[in-house]
Amino acid sequence: MVASIAKSFANRLTHFHQIEVHDGLVYVFVPELDLDQGTARIAQIDIFSPEGKYLYRAHLDFGKGLTHLFSPLSNIAFRNGSVYAVCVREDDTVVLVKSRAVLPKG
């Protein structure tokens, strides 16, 4: 499955943080790197079919003032149709955010 997805990438530099399979779909977590600040966060998740067909790119937005807390640990989780993420508020408070996870129709 991973080899099939790798073949579908364009001939350019590609990077991802992790790959997970949930409910038969493949989720590729793509970090946004800020080399000037030395920071990173998961900014999008690319979703593929089990055969490696690209389905959708989900841009993550957890709300005003919330930024995903990037970590080598897995701090985004899918459970029962929801996505849970560890985020940081502007005042550096760490919070757990829950959002519904569904593919758009059409």
Image (cartoon, helix red, strand yellow):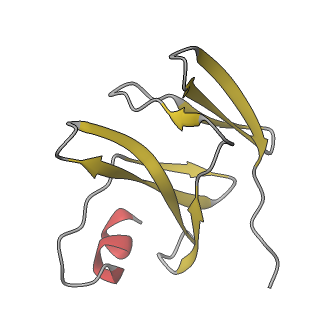
Residue under the image location 58 percent in, 52 percent down: 60
Residue under the image location 26 percent in, 47 percent down: 34
Against 83, residue 91 (above or below) is above
Q: Report the front residue among 14 and 94.
A: 94
Q: Report the front residue among 82 and 4.
A: 82
Horizontal side of 81 relative to 43 (left or right) equals: right
Horizontal side of 36 relative to 32 (left or right) equals: left
Q: Report the front residue among 88 and 48.
A: 88
Q: Position of residue 6 (x, y in %)?
A: 30, 72
Against 22, residue 96 (above or below) is above
Against 10, residue 67 (above or below) is above
Number of labels in the image equals 0
Judged from this view, the residue extending furthest toward the top is 93
- Residue 90: which quarter of the image? top right
Q: Position of residue 22 (x, y in %)?
A: 63, 50
Q: Position of residue 42 (x, y in %)?
A: 44, 46
- Quadrant holding the N terminus: bottom left
Residue under the image location 32 percent in, 41 percent down: 40
- Residue 48: which quarter of the image? bottom right
Residue under the image location 77 percent in, 41 percent down: 99
- Quadrant holding the C terminus: bottom right
Q: Position of residue 80 (x, y in %)?
A: 80, 38
